[in-house]
Every structure is written in C-alpha cells, then in structure tokens.
Image (tube, helix red, strand yellow):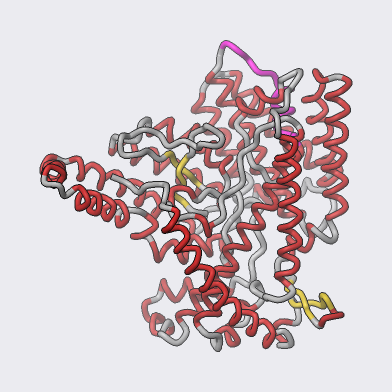
Amino acid sequence: MGIKTALPAAELGLYSLVLSGALAYSGRSLLEASQDGAHRKAFWESVRPGWEYIGRKMDVADFEWVMWFTSFRNVIIFALSGHVLFAKLCTMVAPELRSWMYAVYGALAVAGTMGPGYLLLLLSHCVSLYVASLLGQPWLCLGLGLVSLASFKFDPLISWQSGFVTGTFDLQEVLFHGGSGFTVLRCTSFALESCARPDRRYSLADLLKYNFYLPFFFFGPIMTFDRFHAQVSQLEPVRPKGELWCIQAQAGLSVVAIVAVDIFFHFFYILTIPSDLRFANRLPDSALAGLAYSNLVYDWVKSAVLFGVVNTVARLDHLDPPQRPKCITTLYVFAETHFDRGINDWLCKYVYDHIGGEHSAVIAELVATMATFAITTLWLGPCEIVYLWSFLNCFGLNFELWVQKMAEWGPLAHIEVSSDSLGLGWLSHWRGSTVALWSHPATFGLWSRTFTLLVVRAVAHPVGMWPSLPSACLLHLWATFQNKDNWGDLNKDNWGVWCTQAGCVGQVLLSRDLSFPIYNKEREPAWDSQSLRHIPGTRVAM
C-alpha cells in the first residue's frame, strides 16, 4: 500500500501542458493587475522606481532579499570570497590546519558582524554542552540543548542575550536568531555524537571547528557532527571527476535565479498586492490563483538561491552538504517536500528514529511523533498557531500508521488477497492508493496546510524567518476562524481574497521543515538514486 514515487512520462507531460496553460492564463491577469495597481497609494511604500527607462517599477516588499543584494551584497561577497581564498591557501600549504582556518575565520567574521559580546555568548553555550558531553549521558545533553534553545525563544532571557550584540543594523535580528539557533543544534549534535562514541572523545576544539564554519553558521543547512568531522578531517581530499564542473553550474544557476527574480519583480508585484485587500478583492480568480502560486514558487527560489550559494562554497571546501529543496511544481508525492534536509536529518537521527525505531509499533510511533513535534514547536517559536500546526501533523503521522495497521488486519488483508486471485489486482491497487491518499496529512489536513502551514511564519517567530507583509490581516483571519460569529464574513465574494492573502503573506519557511523516512510496500527504505543515501520523507511541508 502506498503511493509510487514515479509517474509515467506521458502523464508528466500532460500535467506540464496543463500547468503551462494555467500559468500563462493566470500570469496575464496578474500582469494586468500589477500594472493597474502600480500607482495606487497603498503601493507607494513597497513599489519603488526600477527600470525608469521603460517605465517599470519594482516590488521591494521583501526587505531581506533587497538587503542581500544592495546594502549587504559587498559584505557577503567579501566574507565568502575571503573564506574560499584562505581555505584554498591553507589546503595547499598546510592541509592539516584547514579545519582550524575554518574556525578562526568564522569566529572573526561573527565577532566583526555581531560584536565580541555575541561571540562570547555563543562560546558559553558551546562550553556548557561540551561539559555535558563529558558526562556521557545523552538525555542530559539533549535536555541541556533544549534548555539552551528555549533561552533564545522566551523573555526575559532572549532580551538579555540580545543585549550582547554590538550595534544596530537591518538584518541584526535575523542573524542573531539564525546564529544562535543553529549553534545550539550543532552543539547538541556534537554532544550526542560524543555520547554515542565513548571510545573516542572529541575535544572542545573539534566543537569550535564544527560550529564556526562560516557558510553554515547563520542560515544553515546543518550537517550532523559525525558527517562534518569525517569530511573536514581528510588531509588530502580528492575531488571526484566532474565535480568542479557541477560546482560551476550550480553557481551559474544561482546567478540566473537572482537575475530572473529581479526581472520578475519589475512586472509582477506579487508581494505588495496582498497588502491591499480592497484592490485584491476586485481581482479575477485566475489572478488570485497566480498570486498564491507565485508566492510559493518565489519562496522556493529564495531558499534555493540561499542553499545554492552556501552549498557552492561548501563543495569548494570538499564537503558534501545537504541538498537544496525540490521545486514545489515538480512535487507529486507529499513525502518529498523538503525545505531543509539538514534539520530533517537532525530530528530523524536524534529524536524520531531513536524513539520510534522501525516505526511499526503504534505506541512507539505516538511517543516519537509527540517528542519530535514538541522540539519542532520550540524551534519555530511556541504560539497558538504553531501548536495547532504541530497537533495536526502529529495526528496525521499516527493516522497513517493506524490505517496501515487496519489494512494489515485479517479480514481486510483477506479481501485484498481474494481480489488478486480473481484477477482484480487493479481494484486492490486502486483501493490501497485511495486509502493511502485519504489517510495522508496532505488530504485530511488540507485546510490546515493551506492556512496554518502558509501563515505560521507570519505570526510565529522562527529562527531566521523571512519578512512577512503586514500580519494584521492574518491575525484578523485567525480571529475569524476562532470566533464562529464572524464566519459570516467569509462569504463566497471574499473567500478567495482571504485565502490568497493567507497564502501570500505566509510564505513558506526556509530551513524549518520536519521530515520522516518513507518505505515502499515491502517496508524497505526508499533511496536517492543520485546521492545513494536515504531520503527522509517529509511529512511537514514547510
């Protein structure tokens, strides 16, 4: 029972044809809407002069994207170029000191960006988890790691720790939360790996080399300590044939994506339109559909660019980092929706798989999912909508197992065998696929995924969250759902606008997903044919 992960070429071609036509139709309506609203007063703040020589303005509602390629562009290029240059020189002259160069350069970059006080703060968290690792108790290391993570989520501790940052700049809060959160996860990984290998004690220097690797420091992705240590400890790393060409191609694709987004924002104001509900209420359904879809794809492009740049630098350093997410347009199996494979691997290795085992026992699966989503809730930032999101996904994972157990129950299994013996295998396959489809969180939790998964970023406070448009509309929508007396406001005339507003404002989080392993009908793990490693199947599509 299950959904196959490969579709016939003819079927994919048909889907591509239908999608292309739909995008062309909705794109035309969205282009007209952008042209009509370019001079509206509500658009003045986020639609700024762009290509004046052809009369085009530019959507600059995403301040983070704008900061990356304007104010902070030179800083980012300088920091990453310096990292690559010193790493290459160290590899050529003294390869045994390569990992030390990573740590020193990263620590100096963090101190120069956030101040020495912030660097000392992170060192204190590193030392505390290192001391815990010396005791050899995994529960103590994980517990202390969660306490450290909670200290960056709740006041007054978060306010006190943010006071260690020197200066004030636009991306300060994003860098503070990103560096702090990923530092805690990395230190916890180090401590748990130390407990798992009591015969080989790692030093504090190993932890510092691991944590202050600059390309991964602020935004991830996170590599578990065992993988990072094994790869960075190679004295004479050998680059596989053709890898350099792949690195160049990946860098070129990142540049092309950046240019494409810049061009797109001069014609389609997808981030600004949802902020004006009065204007959006007059848009046709085709424009609203294109608006929601464009926001989702833009968030994937944004994450792909960030992962692409970071992964390019990491691969130049002879590392094998987690891959970037797949484009949502190419996804037809919900279990493949990864938006951060690093955090996915971290949670699966240290929590979900450790507790759930083979994920075949009902009670063990329930405990594993509850523990995993409790940590995920803490990572995202506890609030009402995250609680709802976690509960629905936790229930969905367990519900899938319950349906599978029911299908294996004697009478149902006998019916399936009988249908096969009568030559009705297609009926059994259809029944199994139908059960799998309707038991999937993507189906029974549709309303929660179209609302809570897409707007969780706007009302929660996850680490390194992307900037959202004004969240007042989201909070009003949430209050409307909470208060049955207001349900009358969501009538057929404005329901599409509300859904589009929720979908556009709550853009998909980067580096905030939770994934789980998937198996075929023989209970064998699915494997990635390209990297020959296990693909954890995402059950939480963030």
Q: How many marks?
A: 0
Picture coordinates of residue 392, whole percent (x, y): 38, 55
The structure residue drawn at horizontal position 72% and vertical position 30%, both measured from the top left corner, is: 318
The structure residue drawn at horizontal position 60% and vertical position 50%, both measured from the top left corner, is: 154
Q: Which of 312/447 is in front?
A: 312
Q: Is residue 293 above or below residue 246?
A: below
Q: Is residue 494 above or below residue 154?
A: below
Quadrant including the N terminus: top left
The structure residue drawn at horizontal position 50% and vertical position 68%, both measured from the top left corner, is: 19
Would residue 340 appear left or right of 52 to someone viewing this image?
Answer: left
> Where are the magenta residues, as a range?
199-213
Quadrant in which residue 201 is drawn: top right
Picture coordinates of residue 144, whole percent (x, y): 57, 33
Q: Which of 239/136 is in front?
A: 239
The structure residue drawn at horizontal position 78% and vertical position 57%, both measured from the top left corner, is: 68
Q: Is residue 295 above or below residue 368?
A: below
Picture coordinates of residue 519, whole percent (x, y): 37, 38
Would residue 151 appear left or right of 344 to someone viewing this image?
Answer: right
- Asked whether residue 384 is in view, the answer is no
Q: Is residue 211 above or below residue 284?
A: above
Q: Is residue 197 magenta?
A: no
Picture coordinates of residue 329, whole percent (x, y): 53, 59
Would residue 186 appear left or right of 355 to someone viewing this image?
Answer: right
Would residue 426 appear left or right of 519 to someone viewing this image?
Answer: left
Q: Which of 477/338 is in front?
A: 338
Outermost residue to the top: 199
- Asked whether residue 350 is in view, the answer is yes
